[in-house]
Image: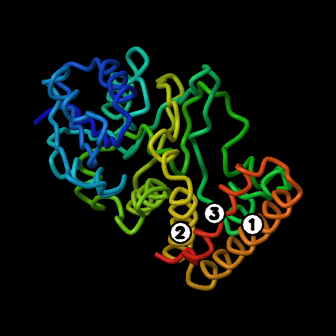
Amino acid sequence: MADLSIIIVSWNVRDLLTACLASIHHPGAEVIVVDSGSSDGSAAMVRERFPWARLIALDHNAGFTAGNNTGLRASTGRYVMLLNPDTEVIGDALQQMVAYLDAHSDVGVVGPHTLNSDGTTQSTRRRFPTLPTAFFESTWLQPCAPRRILDRYYVAGPPDDATLDVDWVQGSALMARRAVYEQVGGLDEGYVMYSEEMDWCRRIKDAGWRVVYLGSAQIVHHGGKSSEQVTARRHIHFNTSKVRYFRKHHGALAAETLRAFLLLNYAWQLLLEAFKGALGHKRPVRRARVKAYWQVLKSRLRE
């Protein structure tokens, strides 16, 4: 059995994947790259430049969640780590995370201090959202949110290098015990992408494990480079997953209320973008947004 299995699901981000793999320095680590039907030569690059990595080359884009489950099933490590291909590990971050889990037997998941490309802190530690949080967070109303709502959700206040218990950590870099995976199972594939790690951490906490943010361990996350390639689908997956989480953990009424609210938001933004385009303001940008928002409305945010 390996000490640590690192699972990287990649789709058409060859250069970023190259940098990610080159940053991994953990003796005895089992690195599993699940290539989700890339067309940019990613699979060939892994074979040629990183023969020590285990490549699982799929012939289609399975999605982030299913791809991670494929890697989890193939893994053998005492600990398993979900790591995005657009990340780079800094120094001994992996060793620190393994050592923390070794020293704290009641901790099921640990997440690192994550940095943006420019070195600023990327918010990755969270509390579970309430319905009011969902109305504001990552919607056009976020600037109007009462500060206490978002401060609670983003765990604002403690220093970035602190170590503290949280509800969930972002799946761009998340390390868990194999015992946790064996107890609660893998990610829920009803989430194609987004919210899957929040749901997983909720199930893990419900099973009695702690989730910890380890501020001394650092990685860089360049952020969203695969999903940027499909704008409308990104909107649909993000919000459909949000609704799914609330249906699963808060009931049908909360989920349908949230879905209706989100669709009204998109309808309003579509009208606003169309109006601005009619006035001649950045027409190509407005057309692209109207097209994307129309696709969201047509999806009705249903799974």
Of badges 3 and 2, the one in the foreground is 3
| Residue sitting farthest toward the left | 1
The amino acid at mark 2 is: Thr
Secondary structure under tag 1 reads helix
CA gap between label 2 and label 1 equals 18 Å
In this view, 303 is above or below 139: below
Q: Residue at x 40, y 22 (%)?
A: 89
Q: Earlier in the sequence, mark 2 or mark 1?
A: 2
- Of the pair 260 and 150, the residue shown nearer to us: 260
Determine the image quadrant of residue 164.
top right
- Which residue is under mark 1? 270
- Packing grade of label 3 (10 A; few <14, some 14-19, many >=20) is few
Q: Which residue is under mark 3?
A: 291
Where does residue 185 sit, x and y in percent of width and height? 27, 61
- What residue would you read off at disc 2? 240
Residue at point 79%, 64% (across, down): 274
The image quadrant where one finds the N terminus is top left
Q: Name the spot of residue 66 as percent of width and height, x first.
A: 30, 58
284 in relation to 44, above or below: below
